[in-house]
Image: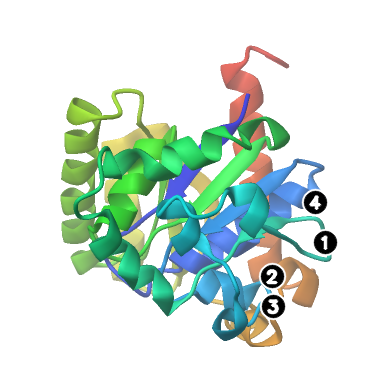
Amino acid sequence: MTRIIAVANQKGGVGKTTTCVNLASALVEANRKVLLIDLDPQGNATMGCGINSRQLEQSALEVLLGEASIADVRVELEHGLHLVPANTDLTAAEVGLMEAEDRELKLKRAISEVADAYQYVIIDCPPSLSMLTVNALCAAHGVLIPMQCEYYALEGLTSLLDTIGRVQETVNPGLQLEGLLRTMFDVRNNLSNEVSTQLIQHFGDKVYRTIVPRNIRVAEAPSFGEPVIRYDRASRGAIAYLGLAGEMLRRERQAAGVGQ
């Protein structure tokens, strides 16, 4: 079965796109067939995969407007990951979808046409509650929330969980909290450790054991158009994302009752 995961946080700068690119790439390394959908008009996931977002002939915009299918738009990257790219043109989707029938289900229907070809679909959401984010949440089985362990992050988390709850109540009752990922973590910071403890107390095993540390290699990799696991596999950041993929796969096996 295909697992569709929206990676979302209404607060920017928390490692959302970094998590999408590197988790998707790590799952490919684990011999999973993965589609990464860039649904952020900034196009950072596209650029981080080595694709020039300014030179796209077709993108996620055409998919959402029904002018092209995912099969038409997707790009196969060198290491086997498939990408639906995006750029600033995607902002036009907000206007284009405004009067469309079932506008919040456009992405879900587009994914359904290719879902059988993949084991995972990872969606990079914009850092805002927009029609793009709503489309991602309506299409997804689970929401992965990357977050920094700081005070304001907790406030943003509450808002996002409210949004997920509203989507569950209205259009996607099967939507689940996939997990909380602690990113840019600094063990020397007392506040980070305190917030981390609060998250575990409140969300339990929904908090991934994997912690992504602050790591210069993770920050450098996008400028070379590569995931960190290809840019510097031995770096702490690469090891963390490979660990996250492993943790997700273990959870998948446990949910299926395998290896218990």
Q: How is the image coloured?
A: rainbow
Q: Which residue is mark 1?
A: 79
Q: Which residue is mark 3?
A: 50
The residue type indicated by label 4 comes to Glu
Query: Helix, strand or loop at disc 2?
Result: loop
Q: Which mark is residue 227?
A: 2
Marks 1 and 2: in contact by CB < 8 Å?
A: yes
Separation (CA) of disc 3 from disc 1: 11 Å
Disc 2 vs disc 1: which is toward the camera? 1
Query: Helix, strand or loop at disc 4?
Result: helix
Relative to 198, residue 140 above or below: above
Of the 4 image quadrants, the one containing the N terminus is top right
Q: Position of residue 161 (x, y in %)?
A: 22, 44
| Other-residue count near label 2 (Cα within 10 Å), few / some / many at <14 / 14–19 / ≥20 | many
Q: Is residue 242 left or right of residue 98?
A: right
Separation (CA) of disc 4 from disc 2: 12 Å
- Residue 249 visible in image: yes
Query: Helix, strand or loop at disc 1?
Result: loop
Query: Which of the marked residues, 2 or 1, is nearer the chain's N terminus?
Result: 1
Q: Residue placed at 16% from the left, 52% from the top? A: 159
The residue type indicated by label 2 comes to Pro
Query: Which of the marked residues, 3 or 1, is nearer the chain's N terminus?
Result: 3
Q: Which mark is residue 29?
A: 4
Marks 4 and 3: in contact by CB < 8 Å?
A: no
Query: Which of the marked residues, 2 or 3, is nearer the chain's N terminus?
Result: 3
Disc 1 vs disc 4: which is toward the camera? 1
Separation (CA) of disc 2 from disc 1: 10 Å
Query: Helix, strand or loop at disc 3?
Result: loop
The residue type indicated by label 1 comes to His
